[in-house]
């Protein structure tokens, strides 16, 4: 067993800083947490950083390897930076998604009858199955949205407590309102 040792980590970004993440071009993320991991293998030891970030405009949660994170601005200037750089109008997809999307479009064209085939009407069983799948997907999406809002609320409440900045309090109230809408829909 080893004695307690100190390990050095070089952090590209800290809590509240704005960053970009490789593969998510055009998107801006805020660091909400990070993990400092010391990997000890028989042959080698190395440090690793895993960031938890949220999209600065949509609040979407993402985990990113420290090597994929690039610092944009510090937490003190984050709000001003976001105000001065509005969200892009068109959705920005990761680089890898563009090839997949092109392939999906080709498949959909074929399935829609681009080859001159007549379209068949679905049976009652197929319609019922499709409706059940849609309801299940909607429940899953709602659950993911609630989880994301809860993560954002915890972060905003923590930042309010740490900084006393009323903007975080406003964000907590807005998130609570959105959560109420989602949970009252039951």
Image (cartoon, rainbow, N blue to C red):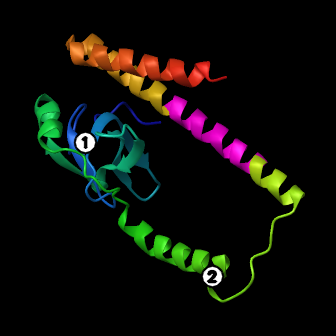
Q: Specify the quadrant of the image occupied by residue 62.
A: top left
Label 1 sits on a secondary structure element that is loop
- On the question of residue 77 being in view, the answer is yes
Range of residues picked out in magenta: 132-147
Q: Is residue 149 left or right of residue 128?
A: left
Front residue of 48/15: it is 15
Instruction: Give the residue pinned by disc 2.
Output: 110
Label 2 sits on a secondary structure element that is helix
Dot 1 or dot 2: first in sequence order is 1
**Few, some or many residues within 10 Å of mark 2 (<14, 14–19, 20+):** few
- On the question of residue 74 being in view, the answer is no
**Residue shown at 67% from the left, 22% from the top:** 186
The spot of residue 9 in percent (x, y) is: 25, 42
**Few, some or many residues within 10 Å of mark 1 (<14, 14–19, 20+):** few
Q: Is residue 38 left or right of residue 12?
A: right
Instruction: Give the residue pinned by disc 1.
Output: 9
Q: Specify the quadrant of the image occupied by residue 112.
A: bottom right
> Magenta region's main secondary structure?
helix
Of the two numbered discs 1 and 2 in the rendering, the one whose residue sits closer to the viewer? 2
Give above or below for 186 relative to 43. above
The spot of residue 103 in percent (x, y) is: 52, 77
The spot of residue 1 in percent (x, y) is: 47, 36
Count of numbered marks = 2
Give above or below for 122 relative to 115. above
């Amino acid at each position: 067993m080893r004695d307690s040792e100190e390990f050095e980590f070089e952090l590209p970004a800290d809590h509240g800083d704005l960053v970009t993440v490789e593969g998510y071009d055009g998107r801006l993320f805020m660091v909400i947490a990070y993990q400092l991991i010391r990997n000890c293998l028989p042959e080698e030891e190395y440090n690793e950083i895993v960031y938890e970030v949220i999209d600065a405009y949509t609040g979407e949660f993402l985990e990113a390897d420290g090597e994929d994170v690039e610092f944009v601005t510090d937490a003190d200037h984050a709000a001003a930076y976001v105000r001065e750089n509005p969200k892009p109008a068109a959705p920005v997809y990761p680089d890898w998604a563009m090839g997949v999307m092109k392939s999906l479009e080709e498949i959909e064209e074929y399935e829609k009858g681009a080859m001159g085939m007549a379209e068949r009407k679905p049976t009652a069983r197929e319609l019922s199955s499709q409706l059940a799948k849609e309801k299940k997907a909607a429940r899953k999406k709602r659950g993911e949205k609630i989880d994301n809002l809860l993560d954002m609320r915890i972060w905003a409440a923590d930042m309010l407590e740490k900084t006393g900045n009323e903007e975080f309090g406003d964000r907590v109230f807005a998130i609570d309102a959105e959560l109420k809408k989602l949970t009252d829909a039951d």
